Amino acid sequence: MPRHLVLVGLPGAGKSTVGKLVAEALNTSVIDVDGLLVREMGMPISQIFGMVGEPRFREIERDAVNAAQARDPCVIVPGGGWAAQPGNLDAAKQACLVIYLKCQAATATKRSEQGEARPLLAGVDPAQRMRALLDEREPFYLRADHQVDAERLPAEAVAAEVMTLARQYGGWFARPVP
């Protein structure tokens, strides 16, 4: 039986993009937790975050990931801070294959600026804040089962590497990513 695939990494590492490509190749669903919360709560993550605060947001996020794990095997894409919350990564690794999409803070910042506003990057110097997030979170990310270089490779190549890991360690059989 295939295991869930959980993609972790900084905001802007490519988790959502790669998750969609991998799910399509696996003929399964992708659960992008931020997108799910936006749909369920009817507001952007920054507004949810501001309304409930970070501790409550992390609880909501954890519950959404746990609910996703109760479904048939799929690709789960939590927010960038999920893996750094105590117990989340260890609990997920029992039933999931966790893959760290690794990229430098500068790259993640540049990519993040193209998407939705991220509450933890708000402020005068988002690049400095992203470096601080990487310093804080990378010890957790490095505890993933595997890591894939998401710095230099295009999303399709990153997805292909994730697919290789899914086949080798996650019990998945699927067509290759185009």
Image (spheres, rainbow, N blue to C red):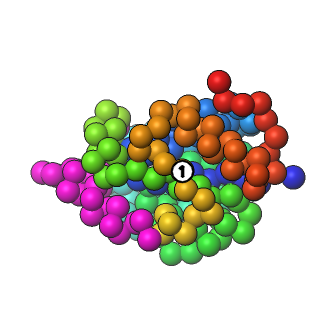
**How crowded is the residue under tag 1: few (<14 C-alpha within 10 Å), some, or many (20+)?**
some
Residue 106 against residue 140 in the figure, above or below: above
Q: Which SS class for mark 1?
A: strand
In this picture, residue 126 sits left or right of residue 12: left
Residue toward you, 40 or 173: 173
- Residue positioned most to the front: 152
At a point 35% along the width and 69% down the height, the residue shown is 136
Residue 133 falls in image quadrant: bottom left
Q: Position of residue 57 (x, y in %)?
A: 44, 60
Q: Could you tell me residue 98's position as x and y percent?
A: 62, 58
Residue 173: name its quadrant: top right
Q: Residue furthest top?
A: 178
- Amino acid type at circle 1 is Val
Residue at 46% in and 45% down: 150
Q: Can residue 145 be seen here?
A: yes
Q: Is residue 129 magenta?
A: yes
Which residue is denoted by mark 1 in the rendering?
Answer: 148
Residue nearest the viewer, comparing 155 with 115: 155
Which residue appears at 40% of the width and 50% of the height? 103
Asked whether residue 78 appears in the rendered view, the answer is no
Identify the main secondary structure in magenta: helix
For the point 77% across and 30% down, which residue is it? 175
Q: In the displayed image of the protein, which residue is found farthest to the right? A: 1
**Count of numbered tags:** 1
Q: Is residue 126 left or right of residue 97?
A: left
Looking at the picture, tell me which residue is in the foreground, 60 or 29.
Answer: 29
In the image, is residue 144 part of the stretch drawn in magenta?
no
Q: Which residues are magenta?
A: 116-139
Taking 91 as reference, is 55 left or right?
left
